[in-house]
Amino acid sequence: MTLSRRHFLGLSGGAAIGATLGGCALASGSATGNLLRSSLRLPGPFTVPLPVPAVAVPTDTTGGTDHFAITQRHAEVEILPGTKTPILGYDGQFPGPTVPSRTGRPVIVEHINELDIPSVVHLHGGHTPAASDGFPTDYVLPRGMDTVPGHHQGGTISRGSFAYEYPMTQRAATLWYHDHRMDFTGPAVYHGLAGFHLIHDDEEEALPLPGGDRDIPLMITDRAFEADGAFRYPALDPTMLEQPGVTEQYMAGVLGDVVLVNGAPWPELDVDAVRYRFRILNASNARRYDLRLDPRPPQGASFTQIGSDGGLLAAPLEHPNLRIAPAERFDVVIDFSAYPVGSLVTLTNAFGTGSTKNVMRFRIARKARDDSNVPPRLSRVEGISSTAGTLTREFTFTQGPLPSGETGWLINGRAYDPARIDSKVPLGDIELWRFITDVHHPIHVHLEQFQVTRRGGGGPGPFDTGWKDTIDLRPGEVVEVAIRMTDYAGTYVMHCHNLEHEDMMMMSNFQTLR
């Protein structure tokens, strides 16, 4: 399917394209996917407290390197009150433990696979050598499994465990880690394999931003549940061993009817009447959110954005709302001193309906001292000029036929082949990558962050500021980004982070060259 740039820019809201794609539902125009409803009675909102993921403790810190060990295993946890849900969990938790790290101090995370399926771990947003990036066919097999089930072999195979090495030669940022196995990323993440990885540095810690208990990560996901409390997911092969994909109705993406924050349904958080920093991650398979505060603060902005995927912005940005696609992160400050003590403030989702309209609630519990503030300058952020680009690459994201004859998701008309190199990218060169889309696609590039230079016929959008590794493409849109690969030669992937699209072949390999 070849469409000119002019044709795409002329489309209004993507309707012309969306109408041609069978099996796709646009949920109120906000996401590509279909709603999967739970089979049990759901709890009311705001009845459970917000949990905060446990912080991993290094097993060794000698030699200037922090070592961690995380065991991937089956567990049962209470997500819905009074009901046990089986999960695949890092250390048996959902979300997994938060891995703390520091710029300039290498980290080694040994992942031990005690599941009954292969796994792959990707540090999303990490500036990482190829051997530790989590290439989709670099499998870690559970002990006792000799070969990779299914039809995709290749890559490296480790048995029992693998030590991922992260140099941490990057600035402070909110990253996350998740499963990235070929064909089965969607069900693996849906069943619990996701956690935060937070990088800190001197520059950020010198700022008077909210910290300590007032610096809180929020992993927002949506799920559906079976009558017995298990996650409900429309996999063709529930064992996650042989046949990839979902039933045809959900090939556009799986949208659950329960919104979880840090693994809890519509939780509530007691807060002081002060500023808080929230590290917001959309870890949903396909759902996009339009986050708002209800009621809005009597004065001031709802959200003051201080960081994006790749760390601090140069200066804070004020937003009345936040639109966040799967895998994007926004670091924001909310000033609860604008509300009277006793107020109830709901974080809502304007893209949601019914049970997905609400995300969580804040209860303004008490007055307290607040020594924090948001300075007018946050960081020095190098700008990449679009005129410095040595090459422009174009990537078109569309639905189309797979080699098997089934319908899937393609980049430049081709289904993913893990053995094929689609682009060869010299290290150090600035390039322009132009993304052209049919329906909603959040596009993630491994190894390096980029800067958005153009969205549609104008400049970057209101949520495109700063260093990004995931870009929210809306229906019928063209977005250009400036990118410069550095440091590590090897093979990496670029893909849609709607995980059902990714599993159905919307990935592309690029090779970085010295």
Image (tube, rainbow, N blue to C red):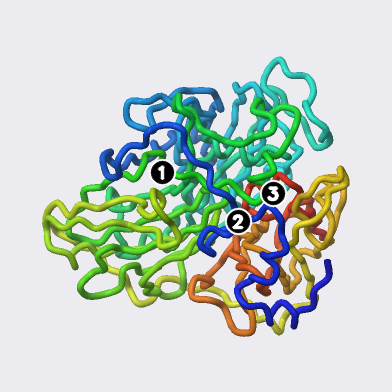
The residue lying at 17 percent from left, 64 percent from top is: 339
Residue position for label 3: 502
The residue lying at 71 percent from left, 84 percent from top is: 387
Mark 3 or mark 2, which has the lower sequence index?
2
The residue lying at 69 percent from left, 49 percent from top is: 502
Number of the front mark, 2 or 1: 2
In the rendered image, the residue lying farthest to the top is 144
- Residue 446 is left or right of residue 324, and the answer is right
Residue 97 at what x, y percent from top left? 45, 36
Task: Report if the CB atoms under discs 2 and 1 are less than 8 Å apart.
Answer: no
Number of the front mark, 3 or 2: 2
How far is the residue under mark 3 from the one under mark 1?
22 Å
Looking at the picture, which amino acid does disc 3 mark? Glu
Residue position for label 1: 260
Residue 113 at what x, y percent from top left? 62, 25
Q: Give 439 or 292, whichever is nearer the viewer.
A: 439
Could you tell me how many numbered marks the image carries? 3
Mark 3 or mark 1, which has the lower sequence index?
1
- Residue 340 is left or right of residue 283, and the answer is left
